[in-house]
Amino acid sequence: MTGYGVLAEVYEWLISDAKLPPAEFVASFDDVLNLLPSNAQVLDCSCGTGQLAVGLAGRGMQVVATDASEAMVRRTAELAEEFGASVRTVRANWEELPDHFQDNTFDMVFCVGNSLHHAAGATGRGAALESMSRLLRPGGRLVLTSRTWELVRARGSRLDIWDRLVRRNGRDAVVIYRWEIAPHWEDEHHIEIAIAQVDATGPVLVRSELLSCWPYRYEELEVELHQVGLQTELSTFDLDAENYMVVASKV
């Protein structure tokens, strides 16, 4: 997955107000962070624009941030510099992670922001989870967040337009999602995300990107985690909730 080249420049419009500051973003994971030793080694392997990675570094952890998108990695490095945070950044997709890091290196691996659905089908998803598991120390934990794809597919193809303007850097924008839901679970689906920035003088600047995704059922994810040596410790999965988190430990 090599998308997010265009959206990287405006990705902050997709992050909620509450999670835009790195300290607030990382605070949303306080429950799992309390399980870590001091000076823990942590990998954020879908780092986006870096709010989580920078927040983790601010807690005194040794942090590596990776992403398949070069533009996202660049923005993470810029945010780390802005906050004076020590974050090592590497452009790598999930399958490339073992080429950059030794097995059993990290105390915790984060794969958050609904990123795993960009892995190409069950094969790609299994390879991604296998790479993340390899890098965890025995007893280390994977923290993963996901959309509830059972809900997404039930709603079908559609256009979602946010019902409010989002203000970032002194500019307002409307966020739009266009969902292309394929007939079968295993088929390639698409999400087009558009950010329409509205200038006070009238012009509208639109940045959009069409992204491929392969949805999965929660029970499939549970099986796939087990297959790569991970045991679920915590799950917030609820068929009526938009998103959920899974924490799985390496056996």
Image: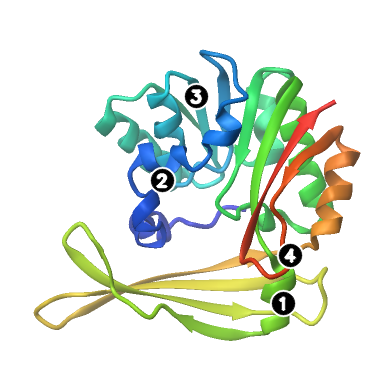
> Could you tell me how far apart the alpha carbons at marks 1 and 4 are, in whole angstroms?
9 Å
> Could you tell me how far apart the alpha carbons at marks 4 and 2 are, in whole angstroms?
23 Å
Of the residues under marks 3 and 1, which one precedes in the sequence? Answer: 3
Residue receiving disc 3: 63
Q: Is residue 224 left or right of residue 236?
A: right
Of the residues under marks 1 and 4, which one precedes in the sequence? Answer: 1
Kindly identify the amino acid type of the residue bearing the numbered disc 3.
Answer: Val
> Could you tell me how far apart the alpha carbons at marks 2 and 1 are, in whole angstroms?
28 Å
Residue 44: quadrant of the picture: top right
Kindly identify the amino acid type of the residue bearing the numbered disc 4.
Answer: Pro
Give x and y (percent) for residue 20: 35, 49
The numbered dot on residue 49 is: 2
Q: Is residue 77 left or right of residue 245?
A: left
Looking at the picture, tell me which residue is in the foreground, 87 or 97.
87
Of the residues under marks 4 and 3, which one precedes in the sequence? Answer: 3
> Could you tell me how far apart the alpha carbons at marks 4 and 3 are, in whole angstroms?
29 Å
Kindly identify the amino acid type of the residue bearing the numbered disc 1.
Answer: Arg
> Could you tell me how far apart the alpha carbons at marks 2 and 3 are, in whole angstroms?
14 Å
Secondary-structure class at tag 2:
loop
